[in-house]
């Protein structure tokens, strides 16, 4: 039987074991969410092409609550894994004295090499005893080193799994929080629940941008384009807005230019979009109210592209710089959506 001392194995593994110890944190680290979260508008994509903002808000809130629950669950799992990590680390620390003791014993009994150690036997019985002793030492050392490495691998594996789980859950919660905020912001932009009752499309068609001046702004325009809704005139920018609204599918009655008055209609810079196919009548059912909501939302969402000055709808007025405010002019605008242009 050939017996080889394992002192070289201990010396070779020592740096690796030491590096493994340094690579394992003493306590689990919480991973920060990354920047690869879904875009803010993606919440609306999960509830269909014609989803209302009410649908999107309900969906985003449900997903937000589910994400919160998942984080709570993974946090509990984190605590459980942290306990296991502490146990594994304790096991590792408990093994170190045993391994060191075995290494010391081998050094004391095997430093001259296996051959000289065995040849120094007094008789055959002593030779056999020493051979068995040396083999037992080597076998015990191998087993303890294997246990040590297994404990270290368990710590590393559990730590990696914990970090991945925490990162995944926290990243998902960040995404759901952004989607929830985006849905609420979108509702606030188009007037909130009080103005729309949530019955408004989550998305509006994008309008083609109106021409701008060389500085990127909108210069004043004269009323020199034939108004297609009356015998009067409108500005080129108003006509562009008119055509974009029509292209977006809002084809009920509309009137733009009218004589008299101090505001934008006589200047060809305003249109009144009725809720009816002909004439004007207040919103009296879900169809007319939803039509007005969606038309208003299209104008507000495309205000910057079209060069809109303000929008009035259902006793509220919207300016790009200040948002929605209560309106108490000569008309409560419950029968049409008014838009004025820059």
Image: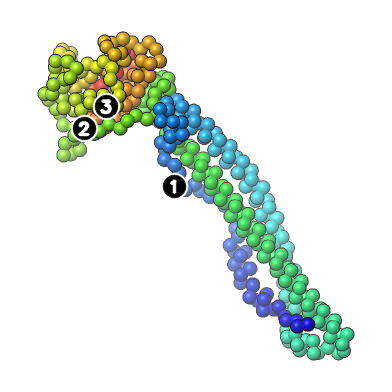
Q: How is the image coloured?
A: rainbow
Q: Earlier in the sequence, mark 2 or mark 3?
A: 2
Question: As displayed, is residue 314 above or below residue 57?
Answer: above
Question: As displayed, is residue 110 above or below residue 328?
Answer: below
Measured Cα–Cα span from mark 2 to mark 3: 14 Å
For disc 2, the marked residue is 210
For disc 1, the marked residue is 35
Q: Quadrant of the N terminus?
A: bottom right
| One can see residue 267 in this view | no
Q: Secondary structure at mark 3?
A: helix
The residue mark sitting in front, 2 or 3, is 3
Q: Earlier in the sequence, mark 1 or mark 2?
A: 1
Q: Residues within 10 Å of mark 3 (few under 14, many from 20)?
A: few
In this view of the protein, which residue sits in the foreground, 233 or 319?
233
Residue drawn 37% across and 23% down? Answer: 191
Q: Quadrant of residue 333?
A: top left
Left or right of 203, for residue 265: left
Query: Label for residue 247?
Result: 3
């Amino acid at each position: 039987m050939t017996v080889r001392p394992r002192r070289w194995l201990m010396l070779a593994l020592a740096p690796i074991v030491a590096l493994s110890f340094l690579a394992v944190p003493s306590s689990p680290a919480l991973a920060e969410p990354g920047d690869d979260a879904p875009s803010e508008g993606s919440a609306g994509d999960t509830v269909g092409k014609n989803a209302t903002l009410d649908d999107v808000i309900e969906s985003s809130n449900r997903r937000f609550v589910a994400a919160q629950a998942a984080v709570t669950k993974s946090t509990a799992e984190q605590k459980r894994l942290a306990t296991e990590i502490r146990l594994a680390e304790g096991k590792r620390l408990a093994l170190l004295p045993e391994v060191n003791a075995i290494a010391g014993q081998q050094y004391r009994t095997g430093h001259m090499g296996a051959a000289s150690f065995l040849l120094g036997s007094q008789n055959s019985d002593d030779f056999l005893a020493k051979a068995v002793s040396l083999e037992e030492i080597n076998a015990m050392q191998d087993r303890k080193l294997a246990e040590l490495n297994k404990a270290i691998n368990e710590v590393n594996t559990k730590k990696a799994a914990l970090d991945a789980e925490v990162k995944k859950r926290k990243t998902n919660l960040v995404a759901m929080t952004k989607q929830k905020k985006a849905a609420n912001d979108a509702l606030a932009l188009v007037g909130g629940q009080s103005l729309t009752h949530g019955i408004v499309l989550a998305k509006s068609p994008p309008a083609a941008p109106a021409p701008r001046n060389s500085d990127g702004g909108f210069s004043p325009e004269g009323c020199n384009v034939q108004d297609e809704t009356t015998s009067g005139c409108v500005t080129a920018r108003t006509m562009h807005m008119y055509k974009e609204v029509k292209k977006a599918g809002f084809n009920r009655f509309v009137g733009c230019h009218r004589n008299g008055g101090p505001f934008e209609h006589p200047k060809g810079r305003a249109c009144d979009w009725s809720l009816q196919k002909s004439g004007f009548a207040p919103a009296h059912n879900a169809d007319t109210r939803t039509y007005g909501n969606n038309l208003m939302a299209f104008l507000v969402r495309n205000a910057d592209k079209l060069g809109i000055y303000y929008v009035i709808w259902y006793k509220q007025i919207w300016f790009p710089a200040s948002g929605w405010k209560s309106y108490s002019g000569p008309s409560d605008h419950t029968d049409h959506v008014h838009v004025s242009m820059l």
